Image (cartoon, helix red, strand yellow):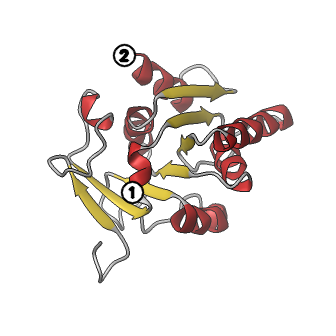
Amino acid sequence: MNKKENFRIIKKEDKAYPKLLGTITNPPEILYCIGDTSLLESRSLAVVGSRKCSEYGKTTAMRIGEAAAHNNITVVSGMAKGIDSFAHLGALKAGGKTIAVLGCGVNICYPKENRKLYEQIASEGLLVSELPPDAEPRPYTFPQRNRIISGVSEAVAVVEAGTGSGALITAEIAAT
């Protein structure tokens, strides 16, 4: 753990680097982490979907998160608005664990309205990014982070996703 900052660095050659992630095409060389890094080796399920989701989608994502938590499965998502946030919240509500893979640095909360969720995940789960800790989000960083979401997950559940969406990119990466 970096004492000056509040993050841990895990390099690809480190023992703590997640084995499953190392098997994907173009795995990240470095991970910046805030929280419980042991979650990177836990049984996990990615739950992804639309930012602009229906009430049914929100409820479904929450239920999947809760069910995963009740079965000791870590929920992995991107902490985006919509489905991602509700999946994380469902896991936490049920007393489970969750990993948020960020499209920005781990010191940045994006979207800003997810501050409470960000802080809860930092405290009770894990925040992860391959980007330097203070890196601002950019449009191209979100598709890049999707490979990490799929790479640390044993399976991917897609809840409401439009054609060409990031959620479908995540599922496609997982299928390869």
* Residue type marked 2: Thr
Closer to the camera in the image, 62 or 166: 62
Residue 176's mark?
A: 2
Secondary element at image label 2: loop
The residue that appears at 26% across and 29% down in the rendered structure is 23
Closer to the camera in the image, 167 or 40: 40
Residue 77 located left or right of residue 6: right
Up the image or down, 151 lies above or below 102; here it is above
| Residue found farthest to the bottom | 4
Give how far apart the Cα atoms at labels 2 and 1 are: 26 Å
Residue 111 located left or right of residue 159: left
Residue 95 located left or right of residue 23: right
Looking at the rendered image, the quarter that the N terminus falls into is: bottom left
Q: Badges 2 and 1: C-beta atoms under 8 Å apart?
A: no
Residue 172: x and y, percent? 45, 19
Residue 46: x and y, percent? 54, 35
| Upstream in sequence: badge 2 or badge 1 | 1
The residue that appears at 26% across and 52% down in the rendered structure is 16
| Residue found farthest to the front | 71
Residue 119: x and y, percent? 58, 69
Residue 37's mark?
A: 1
The answer, for residue 93, to whether it is visible in the render is yes
